[in-house]
Image (spheres, rainbow, N blue to C red):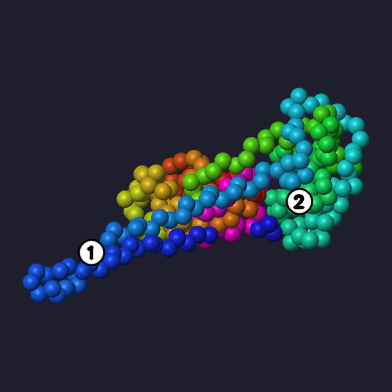
Amino acid sequence: MFSSLPSVGPVSIAVSALALVSCGGGGSSITQPPTPGPTASATPTPQAAPTPLPRLTASCAKLGPGSPTARCPRTQASFQREVDDAILYMRGTKPEIFSHDDVVLSTGQFLIGIINYLDGKGICAGWDGEELAVKTSDDFNDQYDILTANQRVRPGEGAYRTTCFPASYPLDIAPAAPTPDCPNLPPSREITCGRENWRFYPDVEGAIEQLLKTKPEYFDFSDMAARTDWPKIVNQDAYVKDIIAILKGKGYCARWDGKELQVKNTSQYNEQYAIILSFIWVRRGEGIYRSTCYPSTF
């Protein structure tokens, strides 16, 4: 699976010299206590922001952007063997992400693996949301539909769709924007999201349970969602803010995208949770997990 702090410099301490003061008449001298000098305050070394994860593979970064006006007729596949080899590689190295009837159980891991395999062969590949774009120059790229609507693998000649002249991929090459939500993790942008086995659900559910017990003022327990014991949320801003704070206290990075809670502890992926039902009531249970995105959406 695809599945930090610098030390401050030493403090300089100014030391005053001992002063000898002469007393009148006897010629004797006494030692005065040293006069305290100013103490330099420690200045922490600024911590550099983590470098964003690359938006493109190394092979794609060597080429130019795609053309939004490319023509994409169906001609002849130029990379069929290489795409099929990548699928075979994923079957051999990640058998756990395939079901017995060839359904892909983690589309994110599958597609990232395909893209990285082709990159290792010096071939630029990327996912446009529906198809795999493949190219080795800016003159053209092939499009391959390697997943069916029910997430089964589609290898062989049936996967080839069109060839675009000039290359249409990639149209979006902007790097991930820095985010203050995760200062210790590099920002990233997702290539694809899909449902798979959750990882963070117990801690998200635990945070909801904690607030129900400790912050009753956030809820109206006389107004429950139909056929549930999920109360109405009367202070949604505080509810979301405290959920995020609890998760951050457990070592996660979390943020609210306006509809769902995004949670990660790596920039390789994140999970999405719908913790508010119809923008009114608390939502609970395993159904709050919605998808996993590769790389992380933020």
Q: What's the magenta region?
A: 184-205
Q: Determine which of the numbered discs, if any, sits on residue 14 in the image.
A: none
Name above or below for residue 19 compared with residue 187.
Answer: below
- Determine crowd level at label 2: few under 14, some 14-19, many 20+ residues with C-alpha closer than 10 A: some
Residue type at numbered disc 2: Asn
Residue beneath the point at 82% across and 47% down: 122
Q: Which of 205 and 241 is in front in this view?
A: 241
- Image side of residue 148 versus residue 4, left or right: right
For the N terminus, the image quarter is bottom right
Residue beneath the point at 65% across and 54% down: 196
**SS category of the residue bearing label 2:** helix
Residue beneath the point at 57% across and 47% down: 187
- Determine crowd level at label 1: few under 14, some 14-19, many 20+ residues with C-alpha closer than 10 A: few
The picture places residue 270, in percent across and down from the top left corner, at 59, 51
The picture places residue 242, in percent across and down from the top left corner, at 40, 52
Q: Determine which of the numbered discs, if any, sits on residue 35 in the image.
A: 1
Q: Does the magenta stretch include residue 191?
A: yes
- Residue 65, can we see it? yes
Nearest to the eye among marks 2 and 1: give it: 1
- Image side of residue 218 versus residue 108, left or right: left
- Cα–Cα span, label 2 and label 1: 66 Å
Residue bearing mark 2: 116
Residue type at numbered disc 1: Thr
Name above or below for residue 13 compared with residue 49.
Answer: below
